[in-house]
Amino acid sequence: MLKFAIATLGPAGLLTGAALYGGAWSVLAVVAVTAMVTAMDRLTRGIALPLARCSAARALSVTLGALHFPLLALGVLALSGATGLAVWERLAAFLAFGVFFGQVSNSNAHELIHASPRAARRLGEWVYISLLFGHHASAHRLVHHVHAATNDDPNSARPGEGLWRFLPRAWIGSFRAGFRAESKRCKPGTLHPYARYVGGAGLTATTAFALAGWAGVLSLVCLAGYATMQLLMSDYVQHYGLRRRVDTTGRLEPVGPQHSWNAPHWYSAALMLNAPRHSDHHIRPGRGFEELEIDAATMPILPHSLPVMATIATIPPLWRRVMDRRAARWQGAGGSTPA
């Protein structure tokens, strides 16, 4: 658990320094969430994180959830110029804070919305809400986990679909699908969850305005947009080209280990609370991040770490050259018709 804590909490101190003081702090913060992650994945290739249920895992997750909100406020202040940073320092802060929110805050919110205690689930929701993506708390659980690797899931990339076409389709589609799913569940006289998501987004924007005026609102939108793009890029990479099959009776096969891409690189996995061990999460969504396993014999493995693959995905021709034959090989391992 110490490795998870160092990987996730370590950058928080650098982000604070970058927001308040700029200079070398800005450089260190950017390096810590970009180049250092890639370097550590390469230097520690073959090293696996120990897996076991750990009582400290939930404490770490709650700590990261609570820490997210003051860090978001600091990011808004830094980008808006309220802390007196130079232009290059503000650009560095945008990159560092944006990557942290996209890879750490989002991954941790994902962990929290799957938790059993209601308070933990609410905390995860509010992390997403503060990043103007609250509906993901509903769409992920009620749509993605039900329909993953089929055309009924907006967040499962289809074979041959480019990232830039996927991003708007996934955002809009998940918003609509999540709303429909919650509307079916919502009891008369109770508050629709989307009222909380939309109202919470408005409250967050109002808070950003109180902190730094319209520059603060713009900073929030930029940080939230960058963080959300990274979440959707992870969805794109982790399900690209993999489809559940329909048997001769028309029945859809259950989600299995072959329906998600995985990455074994330990440092980026620690930073993202084992989110790259995606197959096991879909098979057993109630498992804590510290227990997720990976099996190269039954689970599709990405050729590079998840952050590197997300970068490759921004160049669709290169992405297809790397991934299409791999996806076709896994898809061809089954029978019947893809859903």
Image: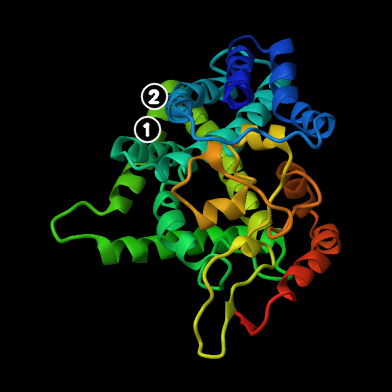
Give the x, y percent position of residue 155. Answer: 56, 61
Q: Quadrant of residue 165?
A: bottom right
Q: Is residue 335 above or below residue 108?
A: below
Q: Quadrant of residue 177?
A: bottom left
Please tell me the numbered disc located at residue 210: 2
Determine whether label 1 and label 2 are within 8 Å by CB. yes
Quadrant containing the N terminus is top right
Give the x, y percent position of residue 128. Answer: 45, 41
Quadrant containing the C terminus is bottom right
Q: How is the image coloured?
A: rainbow
Q: Residue at x 58, y 40 (%)?
A: 227
Gap between marks 1 and 2 measured at Cα:
6 Å
Q: Which residue is mark 1?
A: 206
Task: Name the one closer to the observer, 144 or 291.
Answer: 291
Amino acid type, callout 1: Thr
Q: Secondary structure at mark 1?
A: helix
Q: Is residue 264 above or below residue 329?
A: above
Q: Quadrant of residue 184?
A: bottom left
Please tell me the numbered disc located at residue 266: none
**Number of labelled discs?**
2
Q: Residue at x 71, y 73 (%)?
A: 331
Residue 339 seen in the current view: no
Q: Residue at x 84, y 59 (%)?
A: 322
Does residue 117 appear left or right of residue 19 in this picture? left
Amino acid type, callout 2: Ala
Q: Residues within 10 Å of mark 1 (few under 14, many from 20)?
A: some
Residue 141 seen in the current view: yes
